[in-house]
Image (cartoon, rainbow, N blue to C red):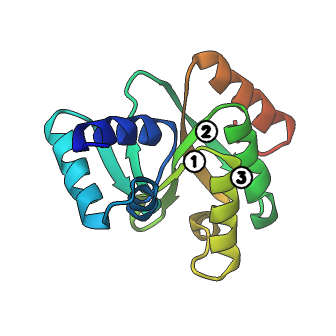
Amino acid sequence: MNGEERRKQILRMIEMETISGTKLAQQFHVSRQVIVQDIALLRSAGADIISTNRGYMLQCHNRAQRVFAVKHSDAEIERELKIMVDAGGFVEDVIITHEVYGDIRAELNIGSRKQVQEFIADMQSGMAVPLKNLTEDEHRHTVTAESEDVLCFIEDELRRVGILVE
């Protein structure tokens, strides 16, 4: 496979999910540096590729977006995220409003149950504590989806389980 074909496949793959450079390198049997160069070439050709703590992803601009205000315990984080991703949502971030610092935003980039599990494992390992713990469990998530209907369904489900702040 030549470089151009590899870059086309990389674009297709990162359009579907966030993938690390290491995994891409393994998939295509090239070095991590070759993937970094491929990403740079794709960006220079106009692809809106963003780097996250979980890897590369293609930014989608034609998706519906909504910010959900929620409040729940640590034990309900997994349930909350699964409601969003199972319906077809992509959880862009978490936002809290701190009394001193104002809005604090952290990228999540979670779009699958696998990514939910990875996030939960990171939290349970003690690597970090949820930002919501700084604001008595109140926080917001920016969620994107293919349509407003999906976002309405997510809102209804969050309301049904009692974690949507209205």
Q: Quadrant of the N terminus?
A: top left
Q: Position of residue 139 (x, y in %)?
A: 60, 53
Q: Rounded to the nearest whole Å, what is the CA distance between mark 2 and mark 1? A: 5 Å
> Please, is residue 155 above or below residue 116 in the view?
above
Circles 2 and 1, Cβ within 8 Å, touching? The answer is yes
Where is residue 123? Give x, y as percent.
Answer: 65, 72
Q: Amino acid at mark 2?
A: Phe
Where in the figure is residue 41, as x and y percent of width and height? 17, 44
Q: Which residue is mark 1?
A: 140
Label 3 and label 1: CA atoms lie apart by 8 Å
* Residue type, mark 1 in image: Arg
* Residue plotted at (40% across, 45% down): 57
In the foreground, 17 or 156: 17
Circle 2 SS class: strand
Is 11 or 153 nearer to us in this picture? 11
Which residue is the site of mark 2?
68
Crowding at dot 1, Cα within 10 Å, few <14 / some 14-19 / many 20+, comes out as: many
Label 2 Cα crowd, 10 Å radius (few <14 / some 14-19 / many 20+): many
